[in-house]
Amino acid sequence: MTDFSTVVQRQHAFFATGNTKDIQFRIECLRKLEGWVFRHDEDILSALKTDLNKSPFEAFATEIGLVLDEVRYALKHIRRWSQSKRVASNLKNFPSEGRIYPEPYGVSLIMSPWNYPFALTVVPIIAAVAAGNCAVVKPSAYSPATSSILLQMCAEIFHEDHVVVVQGGREENKALLDERYDFIFFTGSTSVAKNAVMPAAARNLTPVVLELGGKSPCIVDETAHLKLAAKRIVWGKFVNAGQTCVAPDYLLVHRSVKEKLLAEMGEVIQTQYGKHSLENPSYPRIINEKHFRRLLTLLEGEKIIRGGGSNPATLQIEPTLLDDAKWDAPVMNEEIFGPILPVLTYVEAEEAVRLINARPKPLAMYLFTNRKEVERYFLRNVSFGGGCVNDTLAHLSVPSLPFGGIGDSGMGSYHGKAGFDAFTHYKSVLHKSKYLDIPLRYPPYTDFAFKLIKKL
C-alpha cells in the first residue's frame, strides 16, 4: 500500500511554495482540465458505460456536461472571487478600513462516490483548485473504470504534489483518514460520515463538507399538471437506475389524483424505457451484487403495481412503483438508491408536512403544484438541502445555486461560488490609521471615558 504519510507531506510542502495561490496558476490548471475533458470525452463515456451501463446521452448530460459547466463558471468568476473585499468599519475604530481576504485552506482530502463517479469527483477538484488548494483525491473502488480515467486525467494535468488520485478500497480509505489535512470533502453515506469521516476530522479539528443522502420526498398536490409531473418524476427517479443521492425517494401524492398520476407514470415509464426495460441497452445497471440483493429485499411484501422484474446476470431491476406503501416498511426506513418508488397519499398539506418533518431532514424536496400559496407553505415549513418546484434534479445543473444537505443529509455546500467558498478560509483584517489615536481606550480609565463608551 502507498505510504500516504509521504504523499500528504509532499502536498503540504508544495502548498508552502505558494504556487497554488497564484491566480494565473489556478486558471491555467482549470483550462487544462477543461481541454482534457473535451479531448477525452469518449474515454470518459466508455468508462461510465463499463461501470454503470450509462448511455452516452445520460453520461454526458449528468456527468461530463455538469463538469464543463462548473469549470467554465469558475474560469469566468475566479478573479473576482479571489479578490479581497472591503467592508465598512465602525465608529469605535475610526479611522479604519475592514478587509476580508480569501485564502485556501491548504491540503484537502476529496473522497467521492461511485454513482456519478466522474462528476462527483471532478466538481470538487475544480472548487479545490480554483480556491488554491492541493488535493488528495480518493474515488470509489466500486467504479474502477472511471477511477482509472480520473487517475490518468490528474496525472496528465497536475503536478503530483498538487493534485493526486489514490486508488483502492476500505483499507486505503482508513489509511488516508489517518493523515492530517486542512480540509476534508466527503460525498457518500451518512453512516460512513458519522463513523469514519467525522471522527477522523475531529482528531485534528479539520473542517469538513459532507454531501450525504436521505429520503427525499416528492409531493404532488391536486392542482399539479399531472402529465408533466409524471414525465419529470419518472426521469428524476429512474435516471442512473435510481442511484442518485437527490432522486425522489418516495412519492407523496394527494389522494384525489393518485390513480390518475400513477396511470400517467406507467405510460411514461414505457415510453422512456420500453415495454421490456431490462432489454433496453441504455438502461443502467445496479453497481454491484450487494446493492442489487439489498434492493430486491426491499421489494419483499410490497404491493408492486409496475415493474419489479430483475436480471441477476446484468444486475438490472425494472423501474418499479409500489402502491400503498407503509411508513414503517423497510423500504421507507432507508435511502433506496435504486429504481424503486414507494407511493403514499395525503389529504391536507399540513398532514404532508407533518409526515415529512417526522423524519430526518432530506437532501432534496420536490413539489408539483399550480398554487403559489401551497408552494410557499411547503418551502416555509419543510427543511431540506435543495430542490425544485415542478421539476426534479434540475437544481444540480445550476452553478449559481449552492448544493448541499442539512442534518443527516449533510453539512456545507458547493457548486459555483459555494464550492470556492467551501475550500476557502475568509481572513478578516482591520487596517487602522497610524495618524490618529484616540486615547480613551487606554488606562487609566475615567468616568468620562466610561460614559462615552456606553453611548458608543
Image (spheres, rainbow, N blue to C red):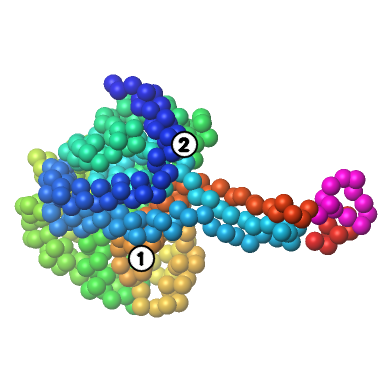
**Secondary structure beneath label 2:** loop
Please tell me which residue is depicted at 46% across the width and 72% down the height of the picture: 376
- Image check: 165 left or right of 129? left
**Residue neighbourhood size for the residue with mark 1, other residues' Cα within 10 Å, grouped as few (<14), some (14–19), many (≥20):** some
**Residue 251, position in %: x, y?**
32, 61
Picture coordinates of residue 51, whole percent (x, y): 16, 42
Residue drawn at (85%, 53%) of the image: 440
Question: Mark 2 belongs to which amino acid?
Answer: Asp
Can residue 127 be seen at all in this image of the molecule? no
Mark 1: amino acid: Cys
Q: Quadrant for the N terminus, please.
A: top left
User: Do the residues under discs 2 and 1 have CB atoms within 8 angstroms?
Assistant: no
Q: Is 157 above or below relative to 374?
A: above
Camera-nearest label, 2 or 1: 2
Q: Quadrant of the C terminus?
A: bottom right
Q: In the picture, residue 266 is in which quadrant?
A: bottom left
| CA separation in Å, label 2 and label 1 | 34 Å
Horizontally, is 263 left or right of 347 in the view? left
| Residue marked by disc 1 | 388
Q: Which residues are magenta?
A: 438-449
- Residue lying furthest right: 447
Residue 57 in view here: yes
State the image coordinates of residue 412 (x, y, percent, origin top left).
Answer: 45, 49
Residue where numbered disc 2 is placed: 182
Query: In the picture, residue 392 is in which quadrant?
Result: bottom left
Q: Is residue 66 magenta?
A: no
